[in-house]
Amino acid sequence: MSLDELGDELTSLFLTASETIVRRLASISLPPTVPTRTMAIHREGQDWRSEYIDARSNTLLTGGVAREIAPWLDEDQVRLAYGCSAAIAEAASVTLPFWSPFEGHYWQLVRSVEDERANRGLPDFDLTGA
């Protein structure tokens, strides 16, 4: 897959996944963002101060809702995400001076809590790089 094709695939994935997740949230009466309070640091020259401000946070990142009603993506989106991930890893293996698997804490996009408990978080990729 060329880098241009990868860019097109990632754009498509982002747009369709966003629509799917917004629809899923609406079906359970949750907004895409929720009000939160967060600390802000203000710097003025050598002085600084902190204060709590009102902000909005992604619903999926607040509380356990993301985990309890996972997976968020449908099978076609999961296939596209894995395909894009493989293309990114392949491109990185050519350009990076080392080999390292990509990982993250967003398993609930593609697996349910039951899947995660059954799997116990074991990776489904070869750690040797072979």
Image (spheres, rainbow, N blue to C red):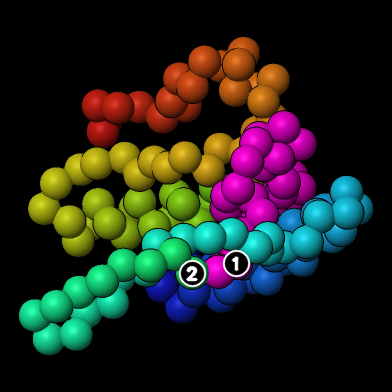
**Nearer the observer, disc 1 or disc 2?**
2
Where does the image place residue 14, in percent across and percent down from the top left? 62, 67
In the image, is 111 to the left or to the right of 25? left
**Residue 13 found in image quarter:** bottom right
> Residue at left 22%, top 57%?
94
Local packing at callout 1 (Cα closer than 10 Å; few below 14, some 14-19, many 20+) is: few
In the image, is 44 to the left or to the right of 31? left
Find out whether residue 23 is within the magenta segment.
Answer: no
**Residue 103 found in image quarter:** top left
Per the rendering, the mark at residue 53 is 2
- In the image, which residues are magenta? 54-81
Where does the image place residue 117, in percent across and percent down from the top left? 60, 16
For marks 1 and 2, give the CA distance: 10 Å
Local packing at callout 2 (Cα closer than 10 Å; few below 14, some 14-19, many 20+) is: few
> Residue at left 60%, top 47%?
62
Where is mark 1, residue-wise?
56
> Residue at left 12%, top 86%?
45
- In this rendered view, identify the residue nearer to me: 109 or 63: 63
Where does the image place residue 79, in percent across and percent down from the top left? 64, 48
> Residue at left 55%, top 69%?
54
Q: What amino acid is labelled 2 in the image?
A: Ile
**Residue 49 found in image quarter:** bottom left
Find out whether residue 78 is within the magenta segment.
Answer: yes
- Residue at the bottom extreme of this rendering: 45
Per the rendering, the mark at residue 117 is none
Q: What amino acid is labelled 1 in the image?
A: Arg
Where does the image place residue 130, in percent across and percent down from the top left? 26, 31
Q: Callout 2: helix, strand or loop? A: strand
